Amino acid sequence: MSSSVVYAENSTTIDNEIQSENVSTELVSDSEVTNTTELPDSQWGLAIGIRRADIPFAVSEMSEDTAVYDILPLIRFENEYGFIRGLEGGIHLWKQDDHEVNAYSRFRFNDIPKEFQNEVKGQSFDFGLQYRYFDGPWAADIAVLSDNYQRVYGVTRAQYSWHYDRLSLIPFAELKWKTADFNDHYYGFDREKAGAGVSVSGGVKAAYHVASNLHLIGQFGVTRLENNVHDLSIVDKNYQLESFLGIAFYPDPEKPFIRTSEKQKNDEYLRLAHGWATPSDIGEVLMFQAERDTENNQMSSLFYGTQVGDNLFSLPIDLYFTPGIAWHYSSDVQKDIGEVVLAIKAFYTFELGPRWRVGLAEGLSYVSDVTYIEGFELVGEDSKRGYENASKLLNYVDFSLDVNVGDIFGSKALAQTWLGYSIHHRSGIFETSSAFGRIKGGSNYQTVYLQWHF
């Protein structure tokens, strides 16, 4: 299938912003907890689920698929500076009372048969500006965005939050204002002229609090394409159905995270790491059977963490939102490459002489260019996988084990310093996600690090 083949554009947002009425951050009064400092307005969440979307094009001659399926990992984090809600996010440029203006991004899907998605691509995060207004259960926003080639479109959305006991429902409606350039490319494939138009979407998001941190989440929506798009010869459907079903982990409403003066001392951290690439897969690395990269590719990373929780399923597990940057050094086979990571990380602490911690992070990783260790495995006829394209955006996982330096040396000054080993892992989740280019495989780096809490 050539790169000129049909592909769908759909940017109805799948997010994990739905929570039961009591899941949002709660505060305890001073009469209940002494030395309590007010918790900043922050929330966290992790989710994973399956998205299904109709393919609106006439593709029967090329494929029997009438719908496309994606496994999507989702992150939620909000504070006074910005937000991440599943596949959309923003940084507050201005915020006052019930109004805010944000530098804004949201993901646009590529709804074609999955066997062509790695070759054709077309999905992306688009960027622009958003104005948002909220009043009690009501919220509305308008955004102007552009793809990488200045094809502009706008989105207007309104929604209402309704809660009853463990159930939350958010009905929503959305208008998408698309320029002629946008429609001509994404629906006419630069062969037919669709012209400008407005598509209409509506649906409902839902969440059910099962127990503790566990929630079931879902979304159902329908989009009606404008008549001038439906009249194109390649477009087969006037209506496109989209759904999502998954599980989510949110703060436990029965055990809100309360920051005391004692907890404030180690509420944030910085982690400095250096690592070495390995061509081995994650299973081999975990079994201590990793091979050495003959090209000796290396990276350094710096992560910041801010605590968002101190229990998960009633266990003493500390949770942090942890953005980070990494620098992959140039070598004989690659140039310098930058990487940005957003993740939620959990730590479990135990004592075996000194204090030890095991950690696990889940999130998203984006690289400025594909590293040699990934490209060698994934792309080209001589590679292990033989894909047409690798993906700059991949799922991110971090496994770690560290020990408290202060405990080893009996030093109070080093009581918040940890020395550790971690695996920096990027992967496409076994070809299950168009957001990650429908690839299987990725890269692994073994790193050593120092982590300072403050």
Image: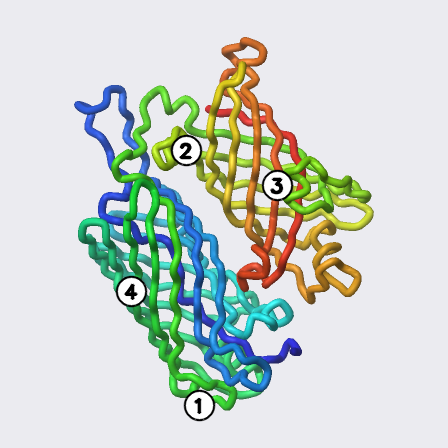
Marks 1 and 4 close (CB-CB < 8 Å): no
- The residue drawn where x is 71% and y is 47% is 336
**First in residue order: circle 3 vs circle 1:** 1
Please give the residue where the numbered disc 4 appears in the rendered image.
Answer: 204
Earlier in the chain: of badge 1 and badge 4, it is 4
The mark closer to the camera, 3 or 1, is 3
Which secondary structure lies at badge 3?
strand
Where is mark 3, residue-wise?
Answer: 424
Q: Contact, CB < 8 Å: mark 4 with mark 3?
A: no
Q: Mark 1 to mark 2: distance in Å?
A: 52 Å
Question: Crowding near pointer 3: few (<14 within 10 Å), some, many (20+)?
Answer: many
Q: Circle 2 is placed at which residue position?
A: 307
Residue with the most extreme front position: 287
Q: CA distance from mark 4 to mark 3?
A: 37 Å
Q: Which mark is residue 231?
A: 1
Residue 451 falls in image quadrant:
top right
Q: Residues within 10 Å of mark 2 (few under 14, many from 20)?
A: many
Name the residue at 44% across, 75% down. Answer: 54
Amino acid type at mark 2: Gln
Tell which of 374 and 134 is nearer to you.
374
